[in-house]
Amino acid sequence: MKKIAVFASGNGSNFQVIAEEFPVEFVFSDHRDAYVLERAEKLSVLSYAFELKEFENKADYEAALVELLQEHQIDLVCLAGYMKIVGPTLLGTYEGRIINIHPAYLPEFPGAHGIEDAWNAGVAESGVTIHWVDSGVDTGKVIKQVRVPRLADDTIESFEERIHATEYQLYPQVLESLGVARR
């Protein structure tokens, strides 16, 4: 059985969807006060948190992550709102075993503000992408994408809500397609 870990920086809504359907070995957050850690506790999922500023440099920070992943024998890392760019230390050990969800139809609107960027560009549709993580920012090979239309009466809030609803459907489908067993 594939062992998965989820990395999240904030709210953790995608983590919650994943953890309700799949056994998650642990969740990691790069913010000690992130709400995802409360979600993990409520779901009885092991959690870890430490911050980049607690280390000499990013390589040391990522070395601590690699140690954690290896200690738990993690097969697949699922980024779910993890707002750090994966660097060479983590990628060097886990390339081909890290996936990311992005709230836009890549390669359109990469980076931290995909929904807002798509909205501001006035596009007729955006979407959700799950892709393999590589050394670029949202440039890895696409696993699966879904388009989300922008409706005539949309506000940025309703558009964002529909994109998140699509994420909650897509992540479990992709995990299953990658051979992660459901609960």
Image: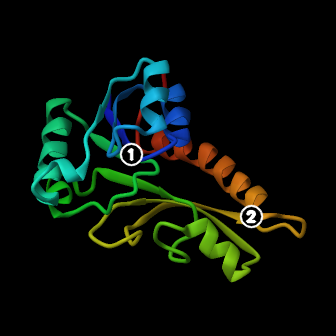
Q: Secondary structure at mark 2?
A: helix
Report the side of 159 relative to 53 (left or right): right
For residue 183, above or below residue 150: above
Whole-percent x, y for residue 32 in the image: 34, 38
Residue depicted at 37% across the width and 68% down the height? 140
Report the side of 149 relative to 121 (left or right): right
Q: Secondary structure at mark 1?
A: strand
Residue depicted at 14% across the width and 43% down the height? 64
- Position of the N terminus, as image quadrant, is top left
Report the side of 151 relative to 182 (left or right): right
- Circles 1, 2 touching at the beta carbon (< 8 Å): no
Mark 1, mark 2: which one is toward the viewer? 2
For residue 106, above or below residue 35: below
Are there few (<14), some (14-19), or many (20+) residues within 10 Å of tag 1?
Answer: many
Q: Between residue 44 and residue 145, name the one nearer to us.
A: 44
Q: Quadrant of residue 31?
A: top left
Q: Which mark is residue 156?
A: 2
Whole-percent x, y for residue 73 in the image: 19, 32
Q: Amino acid at mark 1?
A: Cys
Q: Amino acid at mark 2?
A: Ile
State how the image is colored: rainbow
Return the residue found at the far right: 153
Residue depicted at 40% across the width and 52% down the height? 82
Label 1 sits on residue: 78
Mark closest to the chain's N terminus, 1 or 2: 1
Question: What count of labels does the image hold?
Answer: 2
In three-dimensional space, the C-alpha distance between marks 1 and 2, rounded to whole angstroms, equals: 26 Å
